[in-house]
Amino acid sequence: MNPLITLTLGATLLACVLVVLGLQAYTAGRAQRAALIERLSATGVHDGATRGRRFRGLDRRLRTTGLGRRIEKKLAVTGLDLTPAEFLVYMLAGVAGIWLVAASFLAPFFGPVAGLIGLWAGNGFLNWQRARRTERFVNQLPDLARILANATQAGLALRTAIGMAAEELEAPAGEELARVAHRLAVGHSVEESLGEIVERLPSRELVVLVSTLVLSAKAGGAIVGSLRNLTVTMEQRKETRREIRTQLSQVTVTAYLVPVMGVGSLLLVDTIMPGALDRMTGAAIGQTAVLMAIGLFTLGFLAIRRLSKIDV
């Protein structure tokens, strides 16, 4: 037989074998992926990959950049069901809307200023969501400590007690503990798994609880008594924070009322004297005065917020 024909037949046979092996590997990978998604969804860890996502191409490119990684990290601790691309597109759309509204109702000069304020507000929204989720998690810590104490007293291991707490508690504690239980199930240590929660939702109470659990897992000791004492202490701190928040509610409202009064005064001036803002921002001295006023209002807002912040 012609050597060329033999070589061609051999190459064709090899290509067919590789195609078959490739199809088998692809099918096995799809099956493993489906099983993994089902398992993560059952444990509450899955981040919603089964839901239809928008802007997938932009999201893939955005995650490779530093900005995308920062947005992804912030979204991970807020509990929002958004991808970095979705958040970025929605935020930019909101900034564009605020820009157009400010330029239309006030003056063209206020468009870029409102856009910058919109960008700052988007980042502030993520920080507010993180603080809100952390506060909700801290309020659930007494119940978490009580469940762990009861489970430990009943003779259950710490890993089993954490899984039980993840099933009984609502979000965000249930979701965070489900992540911990999943990490423990795949071989991560207790210290590493619980330390991830401290990094995501930092608080003094959580640090104390995690330290107690880690020390008891390493060296043993009277973990039940420690957890019950922690439960009483956390309940008292919870009541103290609630009282402080009630006492400072008027100050908090004042902090948000200050910038609202500034915007309201601009609208009032433009209503009384139509075109006044256009004439004022048409000169350099007017633009400087507006920027100084915005800076002073922002400084007043931050100062009031800082004075009303009390660490307990």
Image: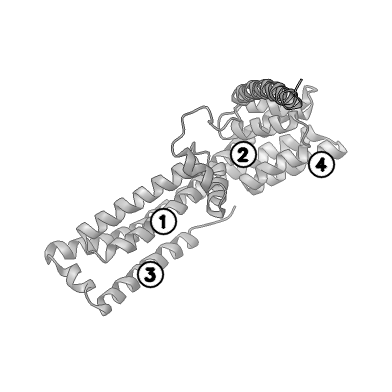
Q: Residue at x 83, y 35 (%)?
A: 222
Q: How far apart are the alpha carbons under marks 2 and 1?
A: 38 Å
Residue 272 image point, x, y percent: 12, 64
CA gap, disc 3 and disc 1: 16 Å
Label 1 sits on a secondary structure element that is helix
Dot 2 and dot 4 residues touching (CB under 8 Å): no
User: According to the image, label 1 marks what residue?
Assistant: 119
The residue at which mark 3 appears reads as: 295
Residue named by callout 2: 235
Left or right placement of residue 250 versus residue 41 in this view:
left
Front label number (4 vs 1): 1
Q: Please, is residue 116 above or below residue 169 in the view?
A: below
* Number of numbered discs: 4
Image coordinates of residue 10 in percent, x first then y, are 74, 23
Tell me the residue at 46%/34% (across/down): 53
| Residue at mark 4 | 215
Q: Tell me the quarter of the picture where residue 46 sits.
A: top right
> Which residue is depicted at the point 46% across and 59% down?
305
Between the C-alphas of marks 3 and 2, the distance is 41 Å
Q: Which of marks 1 and 3 precedes in the sequence?
A: 1
Answer with mark 2 or mark 4, whichever residue precedes in sequence. 4
Q: Of the numbered discs in the image, which one, if any, rests on residue 241?
A: none
